[in-house]
Amino acid sequence: QLQASGGGLVQPGGSLRLSCAASGSIFSINVMGWYRQAPGKQRELVAGITSGGSTNYADSVKGRFTISRDNAKNTVYLQMNSLKPEDTAVYYCNAIPALFKWGQGTQVTVSS
C-alpha cells in the first residue's frame, strides 16, 4: 500500500527527495513518518508529520531533512540535504505507529 521511491547514490553533501505514494487515502492517518534501516542496525524513525503539518525529527537529521505531505495526492515526501555517509540506509514510509505492511523501501547510498 505504500511505495517509496527517489533513492539513489549521492556524494556527501548532496541532496535527494524521497516520495511515498499510498494506494489509498492517507487523509485519515494522523501521523505519517519516514523510517530507515542501515545494514546491521534496527529500523529507526527519522521524521514524522501530523495531518495538521506539525513535524518532528530525529536529532541525527534535524536541520538537514524536511518531511512534508500532500493529502490530496496521498503522498509523503522527505527532502534530504547535506547528506552524510551515515545516512546510508533503506528508507521506508509508514504511519506512526506503523500500521501498514512494510514495503521494499528505497535505497539511499551516500558515498564519494
Image (tube, grey):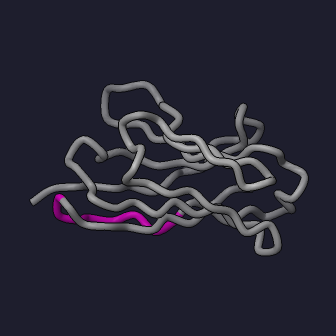
Q: Is residue 74 left or right of residue 27?
A: left
Q: In the displayed image of the protein, which residue is found farthest to the right?
A: 28
Instruction: From the viewer's perspective, tell me whether residue 53 is left or right of residue 91.
Output: right
**Magenta-colored stretch includes residue 58:** no
Please state the horizontal and vertical placement of residue 96, each as a whole percent of the image: 71, 36
Residue under the point 53% across and 35% down: 45
Residue 52, given in percent of the width and then of the height, sits at: 80, 54
Above or below residue 38? Residue 19 is below
Instruction: Locate the C terminus by quadrant.
Output: bottom left
The structure residue drawn at horizontal position 54% and vertical position 48%, both measured from the top left corner, is 92
Pick the residue in front: 103 or 12: 12
Judge whether 73 appears above or below 56 on screen.
below
> At which x and y percent is residue 50?
75, 47
Q: Which residues are magenta?
A: 5-12
Name the foreground residue: 34 vs 7.
34
The reply to whether the magenta stretch includes residue 6 is: yes
At 17% across and 58% down in the image, what residue appears? 12
Can you give x and y, in whole percent of width and height, for residue 95 in the image? 72, 42
Q: How many marks?
A: 0
Horizontally, residue 78 falls left or right of residue 23, namely left
In the image, residue 1 sits, relative to residue 56, either above or below, namely: below
| Left or right, residue 26 beside residue 47 | right
Front in this rendered view, residue 38 or 52: 52
At 30% from the left and 46% from the top, the residue drawn is: 87
**The N terminus sits in image quarter:** bottom right
